[in-house]
Amino acid sequence: MKAHLIGMAGGTGMVLTEQPGRLPAVVWCGVVDPAVTADDLAALAPAGLPLLPEGSHVWYGRAGLSGHRGNAEPGAWSSWFVPVSMRVTADSATIEATDENAGLALVTAVQSVPGGLLRIRHTLTNTGSTDYLLEDLDVVVPVPDHAVESLDFTGRWARERIPQRRPVTDGLWLRENRRGKTGFDAATVLIAGTPGFGFGHGQVWGVHVAWSGNHRHRLERVPLAKNSPTVTAVGGGELLLPGEMTLGPGESYSTPWVYVGAAGDGLDGLAARFHGCLRSAPAHPRTERPVTLNVWEAVYFDHRLPVLRDLADRAAAIGVERFVLDDGWFGGRRHDRAGLGDWTVAPEIWPDGLTPIADHVRALGMQFGLWFEPEMVNADSELFRAHPDWILATGGRIPVEERHQQILDLTRPGAYRHVLDQMTAVLSEYPIDYVKWDHNRDAVDAGSLSVGGRPAVHAQTAAFYRLLDELRARFPAVEWESCASGGGRIDLEVLQRAQRVWTSDQNDALARQAIQRWTAQLVPPEYLGAHVSSPRSHQTGRTLPLAFRAGTALFGHFGIEWDLTAATDDDLAGLAGWIDVYKTNRGLLHTGRTVRLDAVVEDAWTYGVVAPDGSAAIMAYAQLDELPHEPPRFRIPGLSRSARYSIERIDPAAWPSYEPPAASVSGAALADVGLPGPPPAPLSIVVLRLVAQS
């Protein structure tokens, strides 16, 4: 059997073996070692798993394809694809196959992408003469039998990306998301690894479904026939609702891209692959990430020009570079029960339009940003009164309200054009540099007459992409943030279009430590909106010191969510100091490799970034609570072991008192021995900058 290796040296690769009359099988997936050939791996590997697992080839697990033609052709439910062409290069493969009996054609694309990932997608075409009802189409790849532990994520509003670990056992671990958007509880990255894998050690394999609608991730271990090996497989795809994808003759469906990564150096190594992929994306922000002030927690819906001007003045004085006017500027939006869908400036609040605040902000040298929630509508709105039929709904009934709103059916041409035209008018009239794009409810009963009354989550997701793409084309200078009640729409497909995500509506820095720590498994720091909250958290009521709040925000896209008109002079001076630290170091913070140490003592975390060439690092030691004994040593991995580093404390906090060694120290000693830990100090953070000495 001829074997093909797809993947670049040092990155993720797979070996495909050709099989007569059957789809090629993936016999190996892992980190490409130039010393090991495709033939080596094919000779030593088990039989593998076809690119699309089919029950017709003695696969007893969940099939990669599920669908049927009803009573029209009852045999079409079981597929047997036969390759008709296979084009393979060092970094890609395209396999075309057909099943004449089922009336189906399949094209599978495998691509090696920057950062060291693979991405895979199936396209299915109905070549028959009757409708084909597609139920599932997943991308699945095998992982070795020593991948015996798994990790993925769950979550909820204001507590996204909670890790959960479990042993890999026989049977199916299926994570389904039916919220109509990526979701707070999304699996995000489903990871399998060797026993005890951690941030800096262990072999790991991870998959991510790049789709902003309903989707699933899957991990399955299947004992096969007698004397055959047990197969472990990971994968996923779009979750299609009943009847959602009916392919007429000649019609096609493509799965989302499913990204596959392997790393031999733990979760940080896998994260580096995803970060490298995003940093190569055309939409990746190419300019320094500006210090951002969002006014939501300062004023909520109470928009008054003198107050906002005062807020802007104070922000500019301490070094803020972007001022974002949040919800409440449009239509009848004086509270959260009205106005969504009417994207025109409210004359009773802004009699001269947004020009006075936009011009004031720009005159202070700051960018001006604006909040929209384009996919939503309130019942109390001019839009809904004119077009109550323009919502996603099923069976003539109005879906249960969530947050006093419904989802505007963007698959309807009139609704789509309404949003596009109104947003275009606002973005054309005012000097807007940045749009915060929100999405504050989940989809239930989400059908549409535009697709014959069937479920419309797929079509709605595609329409969202199309709308954002069209606005980006019209306004190429505008930057876009993906927000969905915080972190409810974070995935690699929306990040082909956005320059920032709102990581969470949770601004409590103690809670944010974990949210940012684990969101970084997929998304690099420069995308992660991280704001300094008011001293007393609006979400938890907890009061936290400024240094801890600002030090937490430092390791993301730094911003502020605080009524600065109520801040003391000392608060403002302290915040200005942290802004200076961020501006001085954001070049490294937003280009370095993310490093997270496994905590040897609960509530004492070490993390940071290391320059790709090891020439510098910025590392934090955060103590989240009281410790059961003396603090652990402050170890700093990832540096050049032979280089010597100067060490400087750069945070402007005076507490806890901590001075690193004045002498330079080798990278090997910093990694293996580490610095003495800072004195015990709950809710504190110490930030060091290390620079290699020439």
Image: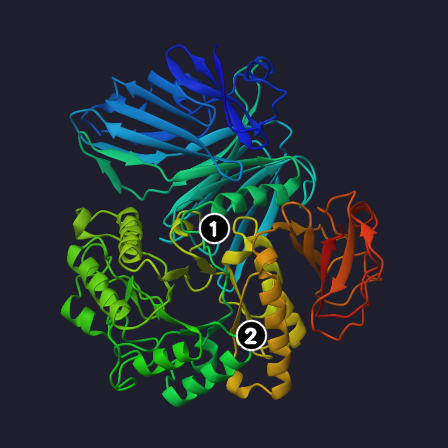
Give the mark, 2 or 1, whose residue is nearer the N terminus. 1
Residue 637 located left or right of residue 336: right
**Corner quadrant of residue 198:** top right
Q: Name which residue type carries label 2.
A: Ser
Residue 398 percent coordinates (x, y)? 23, 62
Q: Are marks 2 and 1 in contact (CB under 8 Å)?
A: no
Residue 644 located left or right of residue 536: right
Q: Which disc is residue 186 wearing? A: 1
Compared with residue 80, is residue 592 higher up or lower down, i.e. above or below? below
Query: Of 154 and 18, which appears nearest the observer?
Result: 18
Tell which tag, 2 or 1, sits nearer the viewer: 2
Q: Name which residue type carries label 1.
A: Ala
Q: Which disc is residue 422 wearing? A: none
Query: Is residue 570 in view from this perspective?
Result: yes
The residue located at (53%, 81%) in the rendering is 317
Q: How is the image coloured?
A: rainbow
Q: Farthest residue toward the bottom?
A: 306
Residue 547 percent coordinates (x, y)? 67, 73
Badge 2 is on which residue?
533
The residue located at (36%, 74%) in the rendering is 327
The residue located at (57%, 73%) in the rendering is 540
